[in-house]
Image (tube, rainbow, N blue to C red):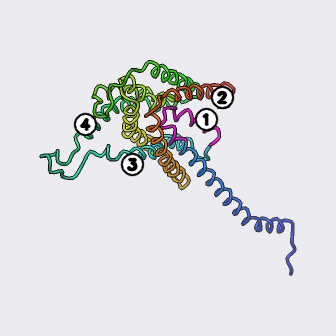
Amino acid sequence: MPRLHTRRDGAILIIENCAPLCKMAAHSLKRSDAMLNFIKAVLYGVIEGITEWLPISSTGHMILAEQFLQFDLSDEFLSMFRVVIQLGAILAVVVLYWKQLWPFTRNNHKNTGAARYIKWPIFRLWCKILVASLPAAVLGLLLDDWMDAHLYTPLVVGIMLIFYGVVFLVVENRRAAPQVEKLGHITYRDALIVGVWQVLALVPGTSRSGATIIGGLLLGMSRSVASRFTFFLAIPVMAGASGLKVVKFLAGGGVFGGGEMLVLATGCVVAFVTSLAAIRFLMNYVRSHDFKVFGFYRIALGVVVLAASIVGFI
């Protein structure tokens, strides 16, 4: 007996025919989201690579960028991503200044004992870098979560941008002739004081490079020496901060899926390439210019951040 086609049969037939189309549409949307995340990661990498080394606050720019470049990823991952993306920027410093940073050498046949294999001036520089890293390392471990919870706000970032912009202008206007024109002339006392200045950068909007450069200038360092010491000081500090964020992310149950790995890897690679250009630019710039332009820029950006916060844009 022939089967009678009912409305139910028709509905089932329609569903069966639409299922492949729905799967194709879902797959297409997934690929589209992945591409958008990739593009956003590239833009984040560019922002990080530029703003990490110029004394203009990467956090201030990130807060604005987050209004336009929102990832379809968890808040826990994004909190970690903002910090770990700095690894690409650190690698740029290592690549550019490898000869000034690597303290070991082959047997030079000129000295005896360990001196045959160690470049003592570079070794002593690393000791000073570690001394300068101690204040931020200790307080960073204690205050990291509290800072993120209470001070990562547009109001705080805007105020810090403006405040340290004014500080840059004041310091440059009253600056005397530099007394420290070589990295080797930096004392352990100088290193520790610069490290204390770096602690101030725990407050979002301050700028780690900005705070340490100001500290160096006040100690009589030349702009070039203050900038290079800031670059080198970033290696242990930023590597430690990145490691801490990754551990907290994993300890909190975070998982690196394919999408997360793509975003993180892309951001780090782009930050590395951009940092190479940003560091070269800054070192060429400070040979014949002061930091006032960055002070004015910080003030202008701070006003924008505060205005955007007041009107509810961020």
Write the start and end of the magenta stretch as one range.
47-69
Dots 1, 4 in contact, CB < 8 A = no
Image location of residue 73, percent across then percent down? 58, 46
- Label 1 neighbourhood size at 10 Å, few (<14), some (14-19), many (20+)? some
Which sits earlier in the primary sequence, circle 4 or circle 3?
A: 3
Front disc: 1 or 3: 3
Which residue is rendered at x = 39% and y = 48% of the image?
95
- 148 or 229, nearer to the observer: 229
Name the residue tied to disc 3.
95
Name the image quarter holding residue 258.
bottom right
Which sits earlier in the primary sequence, circle 1 or circle 3?
A: 1
- Residue 187 lies, with reference to residue 264, above or below; the image says above
Which sits earlier in the primary sequence, circle 3 or circle 2?
A: 3
Which sits earlier in the primary sequence, circle 1 or circle 2?
A: 1
Q: Is residue 49 magenta?
A: yes
Dots 1, 2 in contact, CB < 8 A = yes
Spatial separation of the CA atoms under disc 3 and disc 2:
38 Å
Left or right: where does residue 259 sit relative to residue 174? Answer: right
Kind of residue at disc 1 = Leu
Front disc: 1 or 4: 4
Which residue is rendered at x = 86% and y = 80% of the image?
2
Spatial separation of the CA atoms under disc 1 and disc 2:
9 Å
Left or right: where does residue 189 sit relative to residue 87? Answer: left
Dots 4, 3 in contact, CB < 8 A = no
Furthest residue toward left: 112
Name the residue tied to disc 4.
124
Which sits earlier in the primary sequence, circle 2 or circle 4?
A: 4
Kind of residue at disc 4 = Arg
Spatial separation of the CA atoms under disc 1 and disc 3:
30 Å
- Label 2 neighbourhood size at 10 Å, few (<14), some (14-19), many (20+)? some
Name the residue tied to disc 2.
308
Residue 64's mark?
A: 1
